[in-house]
Image (cartoon, rainbow, N blue to C red):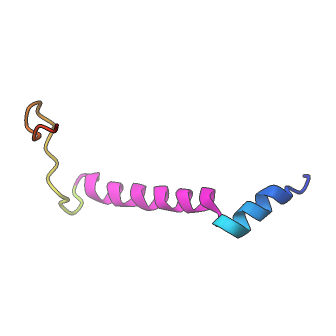
Amino acid sequence: MQEAPIYDRLVAELGDIPTEVRREAERTLRDLDRIIRPGGPQGPVVRPYTPGTLPATR
């Protein structure tokens, strides 16, 4: 595989964004699994959206 110096430079300057996003997605999936799994601990109550329940914005 050919070197990608621009990618290496971006990672050095900005961090490895794809890896950070992947870790956050995996953490979110674990949290959701813990909340949604039948028989698991009770998570927050999620109420479905009902039109007209949000305050009007101008």
Image quarter in which the C terminus is found: top left
Q: Quadrant of residue 34?
A: bottom left
- Give the camera-side residue of 23 and 5: 5
* Left or right: where 31 falls relative to 2: left
Does the stretch in magenta take in 10? no
Point out residue 19 in the picture as x, y percentages from the top left corner: 61, 61
- Give the camera-side residue of 49 and 53: 53
Q: Which SS does the magenta portion mostly show?
A: helix
Point out residue 56 in the picture as x, y percentages from the top left corner: 11, 37
Magenta residues span 16-38
Farthest residue to the bottom: give it: 12
Farthest residue to the right: give it: 2
**Residue 48 sits above or below residue 8 on the image:** above
Residue at 89% x, 57% y is 3
Q: Quadrant of residue 7?
A: bottom right
Point out residue 36 in the picture as x, y percentages from the top left corner: 27, 51
**Residue 48 sits above or below residue 15 on the image:** above
Residue at 13% x, 44% y is 47
**Residue 23 sits above or below residue 54 on the image:** below
- How many circles with numbers are drawn on the protein? 0
* Left or right: where 5 falls relative to 15: right
Residue at 17% x, 60% y is 42
Does the stretch in magenta take in 30? yes
Residue at 78% x, 64% y is 9
